[in-house]
Image (cartoon, grey):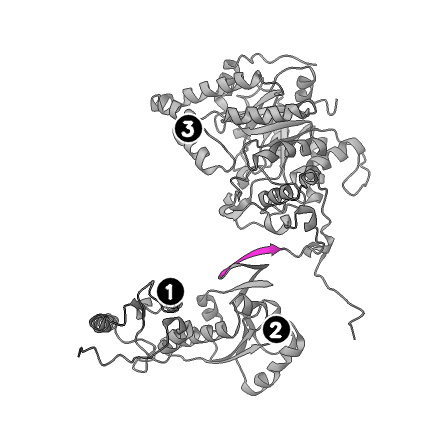
Amino acid sequence: MRLNYPSNIKIINVPCTGRVDILHLLKAVEDGADGVYVAGCLEGDCHYISGNLKAKKRVAYAKKVLEAIGLEPERVEMYNLSAAQGARFAEIAREFTERIHQLGPSPVGSGAKAA
Amino acid sequence: MVVAESKPIEEILAMVADFDKILLTGCKGCVTVCNAGGQKEVGILASALKIARKKEGREIEIEEITLERQCDPEYIDQLEEPIAKNNYDAVLSMACSVGPQYIAKRYEDTLVYPCLNTTFIGGALEHGVWAEFCQACGSCGIHNFGALCPIARCAKSLLNGPCGGSAGGKCEISPETDCVWHLIYERMSRLGQLDKMANVVMFKDWTTSRDGGPRKIVREDLKQ
Amino acid sequence: MKAGSHLEKMFAAGHFAVTGELGPPRGADAGHIHEKAKYLKGIVESVNVTDNQTAVVRMASMAVCRLLLDMGIEPNLQMVCRDRNRLAIQADLLGASALGIKNVLCLSGDHQKFGDHPQAKNVFDIDSMQLIATCKKLRDEGKLINDHECEGVPQYFIGAAVNPFADPFDFRVTRLAKKIKAGVDFLQTQCIYNMEKFRTYIQQANDLGLTEKCYIMAGITPLKSVGMARYMQKFVPGLDVPEDYIERLKGVDKKKQGDEGIKIAIEQIQEVKEMKGIAGVHVMAIEWEERVEEIVSGAGLLPRPEVS
């Protein structure tokens, strides 16, 4: 399966999305990422029972933090898919990239102009 | 433990609006246990503040330190070196309100801000849920009430409850709030102590409470 | 005689007593009091004057009580523990006596959360049970809570409220007994709609001999409409409005629902009047003072007996 997905996405591997902390999400934004998403297993299919559900809550928290400081919460997202769904992975990558294109560059990023 | 929660980020952002370099201090005591002001929360708040300020095009420098406790002078002393060296515009504390007061007392020329709202003395009901159990009245009498505190846990601090607003085990102020007097009734009933509930409990002496003025405990056996 | 109030005398003479209620205005207009109170004069023995009821700021109960006295109407001063500490409570109790107020109703007070100043700090230094004890100590021992002797001993006919419909139900009669133990002379109940439950409650009180130790007045509030009935059913904690009454109100034309509510109230009074242990009724016609005469008269309780 040779599927294309946008080259602007940088993948960070974690053993389980339960390892993803709020701080990981925020640090990415702080360091200039225009968007961050977590790709976890399908709900109910976590090898560690509830890792992806924990990630979901942390993503929700990070969204709230962004909202509180006036950034679009849509820049952070949680997706669920199985490791066998390669096509879905590429689709999500395109979908999220498109969303971020719509939002434009993050005002935090290095490309952002000083206010 | 002392249970606290973070102030809204907007409020903290407004506090630091004029500053470019701050020290953000956490505490490894109660506020770490209740996930409000430990090392992790310090990191999250620092990152959020930095994102917000980057967005405005005015970056803020934040140093993070989490102390063993902020309610003991010896740990507050550990801030001496960073404060002396770094010329911070202000120090922010993520401890309960004891912490920022200790820092202010120790570092007289430093601006100090609280990042938490200190909320109550309580405990966890489940992960992520905390409730109030004690109001520090200074003279515990919970053994008279099935080991449940009506002063802290009854909305009206009644000593002769339950009042007429108790319905289905819940308090009139909110269906989310247990009527502690209902719980007291059930527990005393289980313990075979309902007869005790028939007694009129007379006036509480509030002198040991905050009403008697700020309190202090002196232990001569420990004092140096 | 404890205080020699008209209400006390009616009970002492063995008459089935009737009290009314008046909520002071949210302003300084004394005319409002005269307007509302005139409907109650001669219809009831005495009139409860609420004290910042439902935690909404209103003209002071004590001031309104005095205005009623000037009109020749006997007041029942309601006093809540939410808004004053033991200093203020005792000061007010002494002042009330000096103004000629003889009946006092001791209450804890609704929590301010639902009032018009939810940001307020509440007091609750003492509770309603202890307030009863405070009145009794002032009257019977002539002493303040701190045992200081009063110069001039006040006389009160001491009242309180009970809610037979709150939970836990099995504890409700014990609480009634506690109020008697604390020193209450008369009790007014929360509005009664669930007659069956009320019967059980009074039966329990009778069995314990409690109804012989104080005068119990059944609380009656006429339902003005289906809307009001639904509201009380759903949103007033510790109030039990059976579906039957709502069906009955629904069964008549919307404009006639008020009349039907009055009819229900009259039937309720006639019913409780026959119950052993009930010494009177407390008619709480909320913002409906003008219909009280119709209710009391309909229940065959007018004219009120004379006592001296």
CA gap between label 2 and label 1 equals 34 Å
Location of residue C179 by image quarter = top right
Amino acid at circle 3:
Glu
Asked if badge 1 and badge 3 are on a common chain, one would say no
Q: Mark 2 lies on which chain?
A: B
Residue that badge 3 annotates = C243
Cβ atoms at labels 1 and 3 below 8 Å apart: no
x and y percent of residue A69 in the render? 39, 69
- The residue that disc 2 covers is B70
Closest to the camera, between mark 2 and mark 1, is 1
Answer left or right for C148 relative to C246.
Answer: right
The subunit carrying tag 1 is A
Chain letter for mark 3, please: C
Number of disc labels: 3
Residue B165 lies, in percent from the top left, at 55, 39
Instruction: Name which residue lies at 41% across and 28% down.
Output: C243
Give the side of residue B224 with respect to residue B194, left or right.
Answer: right
Left or right for C173, reference A82: right
Give me the disc on residue A53. Answer: 1
The amino acid type of the residue labelled 2 equals Gln
Q: Nearer the viewer, residue B12 or B27?
A: B27
- Identify the image quadrant of the N terminus of chain A: bottom left
Residue B7 x/y as whole percent: 49, 65
The amino acid type, in three-letter code, at marker 1 is: Leu
* Discs 2 and 1 lie in a common subunit: no
Kind of element beneath mark 3? helix
Q: Is residue B67 above or below residue C32?
A: below
Q: Does the magenta stretch include residue C17?
A: no
In three-dimensional space, the C-alpha distance between marks 1 and 3, rounded to whole angstroms, equals 44 Å
Q: What is the quadrant of the C terminus of chain A in the image?
A: bottom left
For label 1, the SS is: helix
